[in-house]
Image (tube, helix red, strand yellow):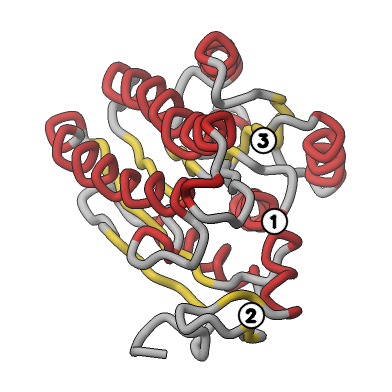
Amino acid sequence: MSDTQQRKIALVTGAGSGIGRACAQKLLASGFAVVLAGRRAAPLEALEGEARARGEEALAAPCDVTDAAAVEALFETIRTRYGRLDLLFNNAGRNAPAVDIDELSVDDWRAVVDTNLTGVFLCTRASFGLMKRQTPRGGRIINNGSISAHAPRPFSAAYTATKHAITGLTKTVSLDGRRYDIACGQIDIGNAATEMAERMARGVPQANGEIAVEPLMDVELVADALLHMAQLPLEANVQFMTIMATKMPFVGRG
């Protein structure tokens, strides 16, 4: 068998920065061949180059997950190059302006739904079809749910609605995937130190109307947690995992 054939094949969406990049790097270092998907080619190609210089197997694959044709082309690339997919990490996501719901434009609402929900559906749909037909069959799908899958922040109607929906999708795919040896779980992340979370260190609105600085955690801890889920045998599944900065305002009333 070739070196590539001996590796498990993973796809990470939103791999160019933040949580996606950290998780892709962790998977690569652990022996996975990783397809790096995202809208911007430059950071994906840079990550691919760094990985290949270390002897790791990475493939930059620019893709807008909201575009059904682009997602199909992405999976055709995976089928052609690797012949299978063992892991999908649905990580790509976006937010909308922090405003009251009556001030949220329909275009901004749809942009969040298209990325955070429809994009996950499109990638999951394609992965499910590949995983149930490949030999040996089966695989694992992990969705990035976020703390917002449990509780909203102020001014987050679109983001919170999509993340609650991801929980329903995770449960359904977990159920429907059983007969095909497809495991589906969800990782809910709170305050990982990435560019997207920089505002937490400056102060963000709280439920009581105050502005407060919130603790952050190292994004590498998220990557470690994701890797634990990814390396389980298919007869076991982490259905839901919450990993968060210990002192962030989530548990409790304040």
- Under circle 1, the secondary element is helix
User: Which residue type carries mark 3?
Assistant: Leu
What kind of residue is marked 2?
Leu
**Does 207 sit left or right of 238 as displayed?**
right
Q: Mark 2, mark 3: which one is toward the viewer?
A: 2
Question: Does residue 10 appear anywhere in the picture?
Answer: no
Image quarter of residue 56: top right
Given the image, on which type of amino acid does mark 1 rest? Gly
Q: Which residue is mark 1?
A: 18
Residue 190 at x, y = what percent? 51, 71
**Which disc is residue 223 wearing?**
none
Q: Could you say which is closer to the camera, residue 165 or residue 253? A: 253
Q: Earlier in the sequence, mark 2 or mark 3?
A: 3
Residue on which disc 2 sits: 216
Residue 124 shown left or right of residue 93 in the figure: left
Q: Is residue 135 left or right of residue 59?
A: left
Residue 50, image x, y percentages: 85, 46
